[in-house]
Image (tube, rainbow, N blue to C red):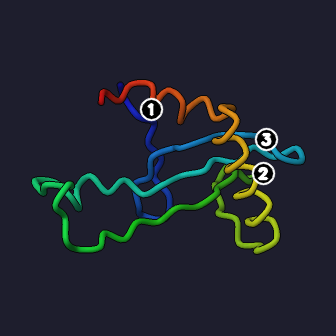
Amino acid sequence: MMVEKFEFAGTEYIVIDKFEYQGTEYMYVFEDISKKIKGKDINSLQENINAKADFVFKCEDGMFENVVDDELYKKLISLENKRNMTGKNEILERYFGNIEA
């Protein structure tokens, strides 16, 4: 399965979710760390791998911007958690549905 990727501010991200809140579509994105861990056994990885996660939205000029308002970010992360717990995050459901145990 192919993941949807998104480049923002010089960093490549994987799209984890897309949803609308108060008339704006947000994407929850997580940094693609595949290059950072390439060739490493992730089951015995000792080092910390830092990864960025963010909410982004499209502005009227067609460019994307990340959410910087703390209250909005808290609301979006709460919504994201609820979506994940209730199976409403179709993208994440597809990702996990394709992982073999």
Q: How many marks?
A: 3
Q: Which residue is mark 3?
A: 20
Vertical order, 98 against 28 (above or below): above
Report x, y in % for residue 96.
45, 32
Distance from Cα at disc 3 to Cα at disc 2: 16 Å
SS type, badge 3: strand
The quarter of the picture where the N terminus appears is top left
Q: Which amino acid, by three-letter code, is at mark 2?
A: Glu
Q: Earlier in the sequence, mark 3 or mark 2?
A: 3
Which residue shows up at 74% across the image and 54% down it? Answer: 59
Drawn side of residue 94 relative to residue 85, left or right: left
Vertical order, 83 against 57 (above or below): above
Drawn side of residue 23 relative to residue 8, left or right: right
Tell me whether the residue at label 1 lies in contact with that at label 3, contact meaning CB atoms closer than 8 angstroms: no
Distance from Cα at disc 2 to Cα at disc 1: 33 Å
SS type, badge 2: loop
Report x, y in % for residue 16.
53, 44
Kindly identify which numbered label has been placed on residue 60.
2
Which residue shows up at 61% across the image and 29% down it? Answer: 90
Q: Which amino acid, by three-letter code, is at mark 1?
A: Phe
Q: Earlier in the sequence, mark 1 or mark 3?
A: 3
SS type, badge 1: helix
Drawn side of residue 37 relative to residue 53, left or right: left
Distance from Cα at disc 1 to Cα at disc 3: 22 Å
Crowd rating for badge 3 (residues with CA inside 10 Å; few <14, some 14–19, many 20+): few
Which residue shows up at 44% across the image and 42% down it? Answer: 5
Q: Which residue is mark 1?
A: 96
Kindly identify which numbered label has been placed on residue 65.
none
Crowd rating for badge 1 (residues with CA inside 10 Å; few <14, some 14–19, many 20+): few
Q: Earlier in the sequence, mark 2 or mark 1?
A: 2
Crowd rating for badge 2 (residues with CA inside 10 Å; few <14, some 14–19, many 20+): few
